[in-house]
Image (tube, coloured by chain):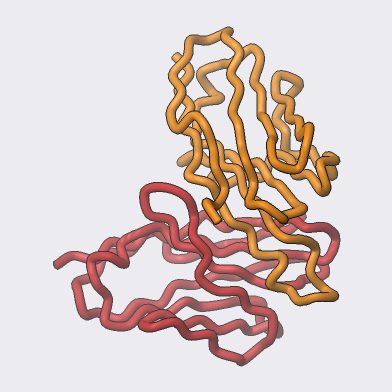
């Protein structure tokens, strides 16, 4: 059974701090890993990672995948209160078109 | 594009009643997914469709749950009879396709705003 584990479960930081969120996966026939941000409503797509060692970057957010060690990290630099959300990691396998989600990391950024 | 549209946004019902949740996927997306999210279990896939055909319903918790997709622009998730433990947020998501040829970006799922269901 495919499995995705995220850590930490929750994190409280102050504005300006840098945070690193972790995601490890065990997926048969791994295809890609996706990061989503969920505020009060629907998860919104952040990144898709398919190749090891290639950093994806969007503003203050960046992510990288290690297919040998089966993990990914999401970095947020110079955090802002608007970064407060649950960050979800999901793995996609080749067997179908399903995503297996991790339990999420709840990030709170204090002013 | 308006994105994935779900209705209603909130539903409060009494145990034993029938509940129907609705979803309109993004136009041109061939895949539609129904998820349930709870604090205890996180985001769980219930069922997904490809070209209106159910492909995998192994996540559907029991016979009280059923889903249909009569056409490419509409799907329903029905719970009958509803129970308090069904209380959760139900999300619908869609994607363009199964991306290998044509790019893996087709696998990105876009979510609706969800339906918050409370069964009393």
Q: Position of residue B1 (x, y in %)?
A: 55, 56
Q: Chain A, which colour?
A: red
* Residue drawn at (71%, 47%) of the image: B32
* Residue drawn at (47%, 14%) of the image: B13
Placement of B68 over or under B72, stated as above or below: above
* Number of numbered discs: 0
* Residue drawn at (36%, 82%) of the image: A60
Q: Residue pushed farthest bottom? A: A53
Q: Position of residue B53 (x, y in %)?
A: 85, 41
Placement of B89 over or under A65, stated as above or below: above
Answer with left or right where residue A5 lies relative to residue A84.
right
Answer with left or right where residue A23 lies relative to residue A69.
left
The one nearer the camera, A67 or A88, is: A88
Answer with left or right where residue B83 lies relative to residue A38.
right
Q: Residue pushed farthest left? A: A111
* Residue drawn at (19%, 71%) of the image: A14
Q: Position of residue A21 (x, y in %)?
A: 44, 72
Q: Position of residue B66 (x, y in %)?
A: 74, 25
Placement of B59 over or under A97, stated as above or below: above
Rendered-image quadrant of the N terminus of chain A: bottom right
Chain (orange): B
Answer with left or right where residue A34 lies relative to residue B8.
right
The one nearer the camera, B34 or B110, is: B110
Rendered-image quadrant of the C terminus of chain A: bottom left
Q: Quadrant of residue A54?
A: bottom right
């Amino acid at each position: 059974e495919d499995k995705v584990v995220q850590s930490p479960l929750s994190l409280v930081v102050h504005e300006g701090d840098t945070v690193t969120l972790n995601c490890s996966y065990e997926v048969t026939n791994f295809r890609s890993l996706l990061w989503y941000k969920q505020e009060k409503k629907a998860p919104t797509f952040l990144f898709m990672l398919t190749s090891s060692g290639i950093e994806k970057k969007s503003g203050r957010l960046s992510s990288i995948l290690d297919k040998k060690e089966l993990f990914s990290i999401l970095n947020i630099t110079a955090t802002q209160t608007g970064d407060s959300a649950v960050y979800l990691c999901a793995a996609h396998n080749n067997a179908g078109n399903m995503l297996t989600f991790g339990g999420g990391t709840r990030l709170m950024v204090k002013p | 594009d308006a994105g994935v549209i779900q209705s209603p946004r909130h539903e409060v019902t009494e145990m034993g009643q029938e509940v129907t949740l609705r979803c309109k996927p993004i136009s041109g997306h061939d895949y539609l997914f129904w998820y349930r999210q709870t604090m205890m279990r996180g985001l769980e896939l219930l069922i997904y469709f490809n070209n209106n055909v159910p492909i995998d319903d192994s996540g559907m918790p029991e016979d009280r749950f059923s889903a249909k997709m009569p056409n490419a622009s509409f799907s329903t998730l029905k719970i009958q009879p509803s129970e308090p433990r069904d209380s959760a947020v139900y999300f619908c998501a869609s994607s363009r396709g199964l991306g290998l040829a044509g790019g893996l970006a087709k696998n990105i799922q876009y979510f609706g705003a969800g339906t918050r269901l409370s069964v009393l």
